Amino acid sequence: MTAVVWFTRDLRVHDHPALRAALAAHERVVPVFCFDDRLLHGRHASGPRTQFLLECLADLDGSLRARGSGLVLRHGPPERELAKLGADEVYATADVGPFARAREEEVRTAMRLRTFPGVAAVDDLDAVRTQAGRPYTVFSPFHRTWLGEPRRDVLGAPRKLPPLPARLRKGRLPSLRSLGLTQEVAEPPRGGEREARKLLSRGSRVSPYLHLGCISAREIEAQREGDDDFRRSLCWRDFFQHVLLHFPGNAHAEFQERYRGALRWRRPGRDFDAWREGRTGYPFVDAGMRQLLREGWMHNRLRMVVGSFLTKDLGIDWRHGERHFMRLLVDGDEANNNGNWQWIASVGTDPQPVSRRIFNPTRQMEAHDPDGAYVRRYVPELAQVPDEHLREPWTMPVEVQRRAGCVIGRDYPAPVVDHAEARREALARYAAARDAGSC
């Protein structure tokens, strides 16, 4: 009997429950990946993330070939392409997004599909419930329950795999250009499970690899078991997946009904362009946005700071920021990105007073980049600005600007908004939306 292992967001051979289950039940196992134009050119299309995907697939194929098999590549809807292979069963890792779940159902209609855990740190996100049996919408109680959920053992990689059928056309890995996409990031990370495992051993940045499943959340958690802060970040990831699983409408609309259509957002014009390009005049914000342009990544703290600036200081709809992030982020994940944008826009789960989620860019830099090393790295025109003026360079006297080679308005922009005034306007905007919703 032949089984297909359909790879999606699980591009690894270590800790892969679906792969191990297929090997245990079938004599012949065919690993397959389908390039689906509905994703490649959908609303979250991304050249940087697709290039990373191609590198991950090349690495996965190498790992499979080293074990006697290989990765079969197809281009088209999985329900059509998988059925053509004539397998008895399809084994896959279950996902939580509305598109992913709909696609799984399409495959299930065409042939027998068996799904397994592997995306989240806990095996069954649906089972994490309140005492009343409802899904969680607040992080802290979810976290307490999540910590007590059972964990499966981490699975090793299979040593050998059955060879592919002799007459099966394996397919070739396409180029990014042939897929109709372009690389927009200057210094992206290299994709693949081997790179992921190397970085994990160094304690380095692994979120892009976690997104495409080059390493499993469960294995990372097991390796960092005593690191409470790291486990908490994994829990946030599981929380947002849990929320999207139960509230798929969040993919397009605010979780809080009172804000749907009630907030009066500004149109994204020149200020939005300045935000995207890192030209807002606020060094910490600009450094984060320029890192995104250069590397396709930024630290989660910066994601909150720049998200607050867009939605609260500039008053621009969070969905514009969500789309920009998904276009450039190599680790762009629908559940996490949507959850974080709604969180910082004060329209999502885990509600708090709006005032608590208006981040002051100057104070954030003081707390998280006190020596200015991060800002100077990504905003080089500020390299010679004295420390006492780096957080607010527009406060420099003219003669200091000239000596630093950074004349405000010429070498570096003046602030696009006054933060104190923008904060007052944001509070008024949200109060008006609440009042309108209560009428």
Image (tube, rainbow, N blue to C red):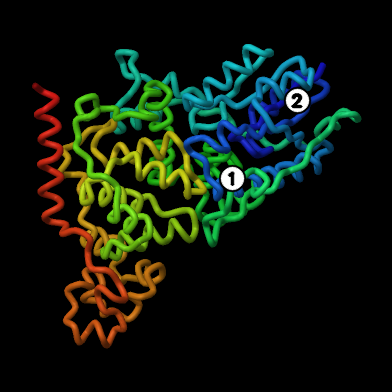
Instruction: Using the image as rendered, state which of residue 66 and residue 264 is in the foreground.
Output: 264
Q: Residue at x 60, y 33 (%)?
A: 37
Name the spot of residue 84 as percent of width and height, x first. 76, 20
For the image, the number of numbered tags is 2
Asked if 97 appears above or below 132 in the picture, the reply is below
Q: How far, Cα to Cα, is label 2 from label 1?
A: 29 Å
Name the spot of residue 30 as percent of width and height, x first. 77, 28
SS of the residue at dot 2?
Answer: helix
Q: Quadrant of residue 366?
A: bottom left
Pointer 2 local density, CA inside 10 Å: few below 14, some 14–19, many at least 20: many
Which amino acid does the dot numbered 2 rest on?
Leu
Which amino acid does the dot numbered 1 rest on?
Thr
Residue 23's disc number: 2
Q: Residue at x 79, y 18 (%)?
A: 86
Name the spot of residue 348 as percent of width and height, x first. 28, 32
SS of the residue at dot 1?
Answer: helix
Q: Residue at x 36, y 72 (%)?
A: 376
In the image, taking residue 61 as reference, residue 338 lies left or right, namely left
Q: Which residue is mark 1?
A: 50
Q: Which marked residue is nearer to the observer: mark 2 or mark 1?
A: 1
